Structure formats: structure tokens, C-alpha cells
Amino acid sequence: MPIKRERLVPEGLLLLRNNILTKGNIFGSSAKAKWASDLGLSSQGETLFFAGCGYQFLDGAEATLSAVRALDKRGLAWERTLGMTSFLNKLGINLGELYGKLTHRARLSDNPLRNAVEVLQGMDIAPGYLAEEEPCCAAPLYYAGFQEEFGDRAVETQRQLQARGIKKVISMVPSCTYTLRELFPRFLTEWEVEVSHFLEVVWERIQQGMQFRLPLEITVTYHDPCVLSRNLGLIEEPREILRSIEGVDFADVERNKEEWSTCCGGGGGFEVIFPEVSHILAVNRVKELLATGASVIVTSCPGCLIQLREGVKELKEEGVQVMDMAQLLRNALPEK
């Protein structure tokens, strides 16, 4: 009797697949688009702001990961932990949202996306946003081997964007950016959407004369997200952005940086399948970053944000901040 493929796939990846196919996002959350509820963003226009699952559900993702790690420390095998999560999802209960409410965790999801939109608007760019109708790029399906399901989602996303006349996408999540730019053309014909990462748009405007300035000088270091550096090749752009901001003293990691940078231990479902190893990697990476003497760690990935925050927390570094590049840029945005 042939073995069903689902029995060969880790429970965590099956959970992500089912969330995408049934809920339209990787976390199975109902909190989509709340971050933009009062921004008055239009759903029309040729340029689209693609928020992506990772940032829109940042607080829920952090809470879910904390729940998984807490249960793992108590000796509950990750298979049983994720099986419990899947069972609760079927009952309409989202473990991440529930855990976040019970622990009163501080919300993260508002800042990076709102700040990115405000930065774009400050650069005279007014993108549209699909809010609740924004599709999931479905990247986890591709990487988990569910090629047919990924192709179907790509076709549906193409249909949705074409129907709205969208010609350009500004994306925040590195994985979403890579998927829309590089993977979709492998599965689609006539995919003609121009896809840019938020940092590429910012760096282009800086080269055209846009200036950012912080009110106080701070020492900043940078963590390279794996997909952003290794897959998209965006290595110098974020560093040049940081060097260009008045008030930023940029302290780069001497070793293990750029395309060879140490992974934070997140991404691809690794943190929910191997929570203990993932946590160790996060702590080790934070140690490397703090060796620069920086008080602010900047990155450009929701998964990295969560991991690095966990590493700082484990090391009890009270005076260290972890923030997204969009947050730093918003703080340095000149008032008009």
C-alpha cells in the first residue's frame, strides 16, 4: 500500500498548508488588515502595497511560537503540540491569538507595516492595498513540496491582480517578494507584474536626493535576512540606507555577514518544528550582533524580528532594541 504523502511531511508544515488553503494565510488568523483600518488606503491603483502574512500576523506568530516553545520546554513533543494547534483550528480557536490574549503580549504588527506606508507616502508614493482581499503568496506550499497547490494559488493571485489592473507590487516580506518575483514566473504565463522590495524603493529615492535624519545619534547594526540576502541579493542596499541616515552610527558585523550571515533560526517552519534548536540559533546570532557595540539591531523580515527579540530577551539585554528597517526610517522621516 502506497504511503500517503501527508505522513511524510512534518506536522508543522501540514498546519501551514492547511491554513493557507482554508484561511488564506499561513497562521490561520482572522486578524488580517487590522493594522490599516484607519489609514484610508485605497484598493485601487496600478501600484500595490503587498503586506504579506508575516507582518500582518506578527503578534499572533510571536505568541504561537512562544506557546510552542513553552510546551516544548515542558517535555511535550512538538508533534503533539502542533497536533493540538491543528485540532483547535478546526474548532475555530487560534492558539496564537488565544495565547497572546492570555499573556497580554505587546502588539508588534501595527508598527512595521504602518511605518512602511507612512515612509512611502513621505516619498510621495501612494500605493493601493487590498486589505482583507490580499492573497497569500503561498510560498510555504512551494518549499514543502506541494507544487500543485502552489501553482493553483499562483494562478488565482495572477487572476486577482490582473482584474484590478495592478502593474507594480511593493512587497515587505522577503519571502513574498522572492515568490512573486522569481517563483510565480516559473508557474505562470504572462506574469508581467514588476515586483520590488520596500528597501529597493527607499534606496532608489535616497539616490534621487531623499534624506532621512534621526533626532539623536544611535549605534545600529544590521542582520541580513536569509531570503533578502541569499535569494534576492539585497545586501548593500540596506547598509547604504543605514549609512545615509543622519544620526546613525552604523556598526557592521565583522564576520558572518551579508550572504554568509548566520541565520537567526527562523523561517520555513523551522522554528515550530525544531523550537529548541531555533532558539539556540537566535541567541547565538544576537551575541554576534551585540559584539559590534550597537544598541539597536535592525532587520527587514518579520521572522527575524521575532527570533532576534527572543534572543535579546534570553540574554537579558534590557538596553537593546530590535526593530524593522521601516520603523527606523519612519523615525527618521523629515516632517513636511
Image: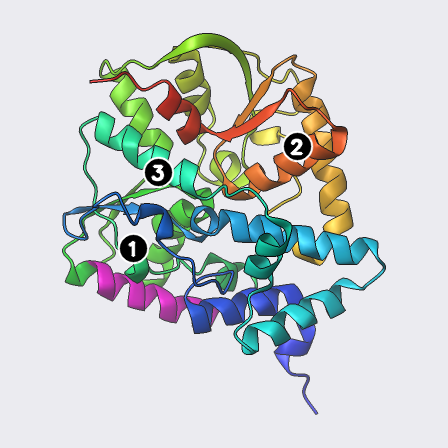
Tell me, yes or no, whether the two marked residues, 2 and 3, touch with CB atoms within 8 Å.
no
Numbered disc 1: secondary structure: helix
Mark sitting earlier along the chain (2/3): 3
Q: Depth check: give the residue in front, 203 or 275.
A: 275
Tell me the kind of residue under disc 2: Thr
Q: Considering only vertical position in the picture, is 97 above or below 201?
A: below
Task: Describe the colour scheme in one phrase.
Answer: rainbow
Specify the label residue 262 is tagged with: 2
Distance from disc 2 to disc 1, alpha carbons, whole Å, reads 34 Å
- Counting the numbered discs, the total is 3
Mark sitting earlier along the chain (2/1): 1
Q: Mark 1 points at which residue?
A: 131
Tell me the kind of residue under disc 1: Ala
Mark sitting earlier along the chain (3/1): 3
Where does the image place residue 244, in percent across and percent down from the top left? 38, 12
Specify the label residue 114 is tagged with: 3
Judged left or right of residue 230, residue 270 is right
Judged left or right of residue 242, residue 279 is right
Front disc: 2 or 1: 1
| The magenta segment | 147-161
